[in-house]
Amino acid sequence: MKKTVNPWGWQEAYGYQQAVELSGLQDMLICSGQTPNDDEGAPVLPGDMAGQIEAAFDNIEALFVAAGWSTSDIAQMKIYTTDMDRFMAESDGLIRRLRRDGIATTQTLIGVSRLAFPEMLVEIEVLAVRQADRLRNGRNKRVSTGMIA
């Protein structure tokens, strides 16, 4: 079960949650940082912060589809950017997208001097959690301890 914890309301303007409480048995999807790149790994949209944010999140969505997950399962997001001021000024599209898709996540925004390729302005890393498969499907599975859950 995933429950948001917000003792204040100001963070909602930025599209994130102060904390997400996870309880019960969970499946986790831990994702590498996704960048604005094409299917061959080449950077796209040099110099376009808003476009790169969208492209990085498009890659997150593609990863989630391939894994059979929903982006609404995202519990934590870390955003790395080479330009904090531009990110803050041009991240409205991401905020709208998170709200539209029902993504209630904690977020950390980190300024860095450079990403993998010099033309990249943003990288987004996510961690997702959902109810364990054995509970969703109502069947018992052997767990790593050798015990039956």
Image (tube, helix red, strand yellow):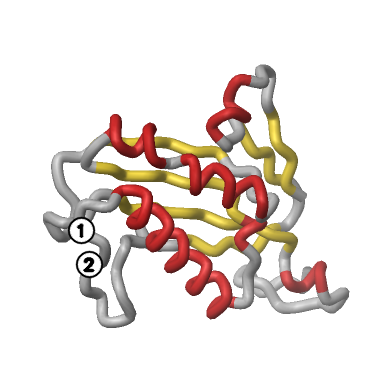
Question: Which residue reaches farthest left?
Answer: 118
- Looking at the picture, tell me which residue is in the foreground, 8 or 31: 8
Q: Which residue is mark 2?
A: 43
- Looking at the picture, tell me which residue is in the foreground, 58 or 48: 48
The answer to whether 106 is drawn above or below residue 139 in the figure is: above
- Using the image, tell me which numbered label, if any, was put on residue 121: none
Residue 87: which quarter of the image?
Answer: top left
Say left or right for 149 vs 7.
right
Q: Regarding mark 2 in the picture, which secondary structure is present there?
A: loop
Q: Give the mark toward the camera: 1 or 2.
A: 1
Say left or right for 78 vs 45.
right
Q: Amino acid at mark 2?
A: Pro
Graded by Cα atoms within 10 Å as few (under 14), some (14 to 19) or many (20 or more), the crowding at tag 2 reads some
Q: Amino acid at mark 1?
A: Pro
Point out residue 21 in the picture as x, y percentages from the top left corner: 68, 39
Which residue sits at x=67%, y=72%?
143
Which residue sits at x=72%, y=65%?
132
Point out residue 125 in the picture as x, y percentages from the top left corner: 41, 54
The answer to whether the residue labelled 1 contacts the one labelled 2, judged by CB atoms less than 8 Å apart, is: yes
Which residue sits at x=78%, y=69%?
149
Residue 71: which quarter of the image?
Answer: bottom right
Count of all numbered marks drawn on residues in the image = 2
Q: Which residue is mark 1?
A: 46
Which residue sits at x=32%, y=53%?
123
The answer to whether 11 is drawn above or below residue 91 in the figure is: above
The answer to whether 114 is drawn above or below residue 52 in the figure is: above
Q: Regarding mark 1 in the picture, which secondary structure is present there?
A: loop
Tell me how far mark 1 sits from mark 2, CA to CA. Answer: 7 Å
